[in-house]
Image: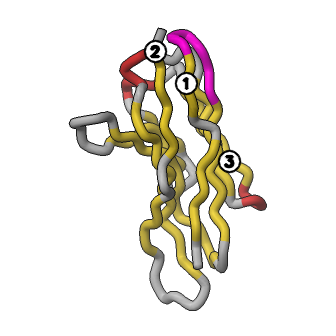
Amino acid sequence: QVQLVESGGGFVQPGGSLRLSCAASGSILSINAMGWYRQAPGKQRELVATFTSGGDTNYADAVKGRFAISRDNPKNTVYLQMNSLKPEDTAVYYCNANLRPGGAWLARNFWGQGTQVTVSS
């Protein structure tokens, strides 16, 4: 069974930093894309930052210059370094991966369970 396990959320004051991690485990043949989304109360889930299937990075305008996505390919892990956090960054952050599980013909999307990030004074 493929699982995405996130860690690193928490409570931080405005201007602070947090680092999220997401590790994909299980039988995985290949990972096409992997990254982070978030969902604030009463809002739709939105893209934060991802690695595309071509290896490029894609950021939401709201986080450009403050957040940085990185990855450790041998560990099937992505990270999200979040700096200069603002109250509007408060949300549940979800890891997403488009990957091909072992034994499967096609890749499909997987989601982590989410980790809460709260930015408040």
For mark 3, give the secondary structure.
strand
- Residue 58 visible? The answer is no
The magenta-colored residue range is: 13-18
Q: Residue at x 46, y 66 (%)?
A: 110
Q: Is residue 100 magenta?
A: no
Query: Taken as a whole, is the magenta stretch helix, strand or loop?
Result: loop
Q: Earlier in the sequence, mark 1 or mark 3?
A: 1
Where 78 sits versus 33, above or below?
Answer: above
Which residue in the structure is indicated by mark 3?
Answer: 71
Q: Residue at x 75, y 59 (%)?
A: 75
Q: Amino acid at mark 3?
A: Arg
Pointers 2 and 1 in contact (CB under 8 A)? yes
Where 52 sits versus 101, above or below?
Answer: above
Q: Residues within 10 Å of mark 2 (few under 14, many from 20)?
A: some
Pointers 1 and 3 in contact (CB under 8 A)? no
Which residue in the structure is indicated by mark 1?
Answer: 11
Instruction: Tell me, for residue 120, which label it has, or none.
Output: 2
Q: Residue at x 48, y 37 (%)?
A: 116
Where 98 sits versus 47, above or below?
Answer: below
Front residue of 87/76: it is 87
Front residue of 79/9: it is 9
Estimate the spatial distance between the alpha carbons at disc 1 and disc 3, rounded to whole Å: 24 Å
Q: Is residue 16 magenta?
A: yes
Estimate the spatial distance between the alpha carbons at disc 2 and disc 1, rounded to whole Å: 7 Å
Q: Amino acid at mark 2?
A: Ser
Q: Would residue 20 appear left or right of 75 to someone viewing this image?
A: left
Estimate the spatial distance between the alpha carbons at disc 2 and disc 3, rounded to whole Å: 28 Å
Where 99 sits versus 76, above or below?
Answer: below
Q: Where, quadrant-wise, is the N terminus in this rendering? A: bottom right
Q: Earlier in the sequence, mark 2 or mark 3?
A: 3
